Amino acid sequence: MLTRAVLVLIQWLGYLPLPVVRALGAMLGLLLYGLVASRRRVVTTNLRLCFPHWSKVEVRCQTILVFIHFAQSWLDRGWLWYGPARYIRNRLQLTGALEELDGISPTVIFLPHFVGLDAVGMALTQQTTRRYTTIYTNQANAVSDAWILQGRQRFGSMRLFGRVDGVKPIVEALRKGDPLILLPDMNFGPEDSLFVPFYGVPAATVPSLSRFARLGRAKVVPILAKMTSNGYEIQVLRAWDNFPSGDLVADTTLMNSRLQSYIDNMPSQYYWVHKRFKDRPQGAPSVY
């Protein structure tokens, strides 16, 4: 009952002016920073590991910003998923190498976990003509699960594959010209993962970007989402050259290296609330 009430409230917020929604998100973020000590420690640990040159003051300030941007992005889902379509068109600026999305050539989209990742899905499905696919993990809460599924398929051109569907239908859709959106930059467990550097720290990383690009004979196009005062800037980057190379370790290492360069431009908008270094190489102590 509480979950349903919260989600309805977020939907109502979708009709308010964006500055009001963002101000409420900032207050919520500060509240979460103060109350959720366990997650605050996760963010602080991640930032200290990845930015050892930052002072304690810098780490604390960035940690606060991480919570603020995280909360703002959640409230933004109200207008992204339920607000008037004109709000979305006006607030999502699709820029960059848009020609990479033209035609029907097999394309894997590398979508890192920045707070605006759902804005990317909305921009692509509303402002381009291709049909996109992605891999979806069901949420434990059935009400939240239905809310997310409905929101992400709002414009009807997003096909969500469950992990139980296997690889075959995903590759078939990719080869037929439906771009596959992948978010492989989280810790999904040691199984099928490689330990490759992320900011110099060994991180369990799934090599799915390289594997799907090879299986689908597809190019890899990164897309980044940056939260702005007017909404989000969705930047389409040029396809990576010579990727995949045929070497899973080299490809996955390159993915993390490129991701670092993206994060460096907007560190407080990355999903640092996730335990990125939860799994450790054999014999290495826990960092959390």
Image: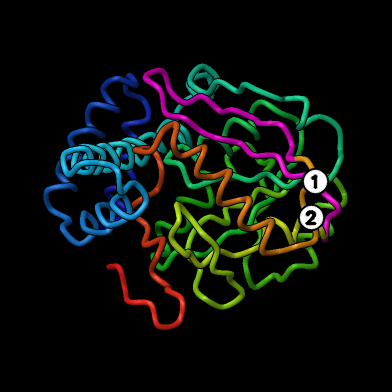
Image coordinates of residue 175 in percent, x first then y, are 86, 52
Q: On screen, 100 above or below 280?
A: above
Outermost residue, front side: 53
**Which is the main secondary structure of the residues drawn in magenta?**
strand
Quadrant of the image for the N terminus? bottom left
Query: Which element carries disc 2, helix, strand or loop?
Result: loop
Towards the viewer: 247 or 119: 247
The residue under the point 53% across, 55% down is 185
Q: On screen, 78 above or below 134?
A: above
Image coordinates of residue 155 in percent, x first then y, are 62, 36
Q: On screen, 14 above or below 270?
A: above
> Which label number is shown at residue 245?
2
Marks 2 and 1, how far apart at CA? 6 Å
Image coordinates of residue 262 in percent, x first then y, are 51, 37
Towards the viewer: 178 or 39: 39
Tell me the crowding category of disc 1: few under 14, some 14 to 19, or many 20 or more residues within 10 angstroms, Cα based. few
Outermost residue, bottom side: 283
> Which label number is shown at residue 242?
1
Magenta-tinted stretch: 215-240
Cβ–Cβ under 8 Å for marks 2 and 1: yes
Query: Which element carries disc 1, helix, strand or loop?
Result: loop
The residue under the point 58% across, 39% down is 121
